[in-house]
Amino acid sequence: MTSYKDWVVETSSTTGTGAYSLSGSAPAGTSYFTFRQRYANGEDEVVYWVVNANRTRWEKNRFGTLTYGTPDTLSRNVVESTNGDAPVSWVGGDSLLIYCVPDSDQAEFSISMGLGTTRPDVLKYGQWADEDGLASDFDQLKHYDGTSDDVVGVVNRTAHQATIYGLPPGYLYGLTVSRSSATAIGIAAGTAMDSTNVVGIRIGSAITKSTAGSWVTGSAQNGMADGVTIGNNTWYHVFAGLADGVGDAFIDTSVSAANAPSEFSHFRRIGSFKTDGSAQIIAFTQTGDLFQWTTAPLDQNTVNLGSVGGSNNLTMSVPLGVAVRWQGAAQGFSAGTAGGWSLHLKTPGTTFGGGAMLAGFSAGGAGDNGQMACFAEVLTNTSSQIVVVSAAATSNVFITATTIGWIDSRGQDG
């Protein structure tokens, strides 16, 4: 019966195409067994692989015979190899590794290895857990493709949880942002791809981050980015990310996380909030992509739109630095207007015809007043602005606008 046994790895300096001379030692720094420790003298159905140090050539052997001696030897019976399934002629300096694997007909070997700070030499292709560079009890799960090590996930040894990367681009589930208190932001559990669409981010349970000071790992700790402090009447952005491999969050004034704490290798913006004149978080709610003010602010109050056909930028209470869909209530009215008039709300940079008409009203004569009100949704620019255009026969047309909330895709649409 074909025979193979676990954890057998031995080095060899064999050259040519003859039987393998075994060194009697496992690779330095490992705890693998030698063939003599696992096989009896004369055992003749050993299945084993051989690979050179730079992994450019390999063999699979079946029904090899182990012979004790000085040194021990393994006969060759090659069934697959990089030499057209014929024996590989090894040369000096190849520094061979010889090890046992299951009897399968796979052409290329893939195994999952144990922990370490460097990839085990025995691994030709496959996954291994890297202890280096992450916080205590966390390991990076890496895949070696024969050329480079690609990070495919993070393993939490204490919680017995694994976060596997490879989510769809822009993926975002959960991670809802809320006002935990006047000085703290809540982040719900959830998962998302990072801003580069390379690494997955997972926060396993809800956390809070305080605005009181510089970022500290963990829930109910300070959450401000490097050099960022809480101020009055200021917009801030909330980011979920991996800090030393652990899901956490931080708060930055930069929409691109330019001040991210050094512990964060990957991150993703998940929401925004604004402070009031006392540096306290203004109350809001989030439902999916929709953010709504608890008390809707009156952003524009009886603004005279000036000359006929004039274009006016209106700054609204929506996040600064990112384009969102403003939602609000707007009222247009005239004072002593003769003839018809209309107002158009639109996205900055678009033509007049591209905006949604806010209101249209015909007044009967001089001194008549007209009013029209409606709900509107308009895409802003990154300066929190929308544009209103007056199409009237007079300059005495005004607008009042209140922000109800905004829709923020937070990177889900590219």
Image (cartoon, rainbow, N blue to C red):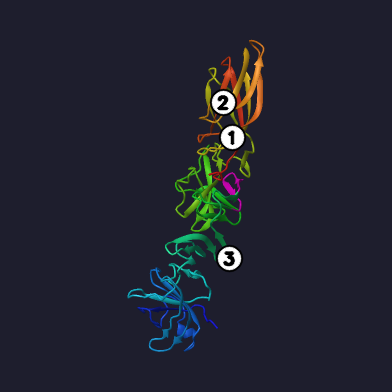
Q: Is mark 3 on a helix, strand or loop?
A: loop
| Quadrant in which residue 308 is drawn | top right
Q: Name the residue under label 1.
A: 326
Circle on res. 294: none
- Type of the residue with mark 3: His
Q: Earlier in the sequence, mark 3 or mark 2?
A: 3
Q: Is mark 2 on a helix, strand or loop?
A: helix
Coordinates of residue 72 in the picture (x, y in percent): 41, 86
Label 3: how many residues lie within 10 Å, few (<14), some (14-19) or many (20+)?
A: few
Q: Earlier in the sequence, mark 2 or mark 1?
A: 1
Pick the residue in front: 234 or 78: 78
In the image, residue 407 sits, relative to residue 78, either above or below, namely above
Check if mark 3's residue and mark 1's residue have beta carbons within 8 Å: no
Label 2: how many residues lie within 10 Å, few (<14), some (14-19) or many (20+)?
A: few
Residue drawn at x 41%, y 76% as measured from the top left: 87
Coordinates of residue 344 in the picture (x, y in percent): 59, 25
In the image, residue 360 sits, relative to residue 414, either above or below, namely above
| Quadrant in which residue 273 is drawn | top right
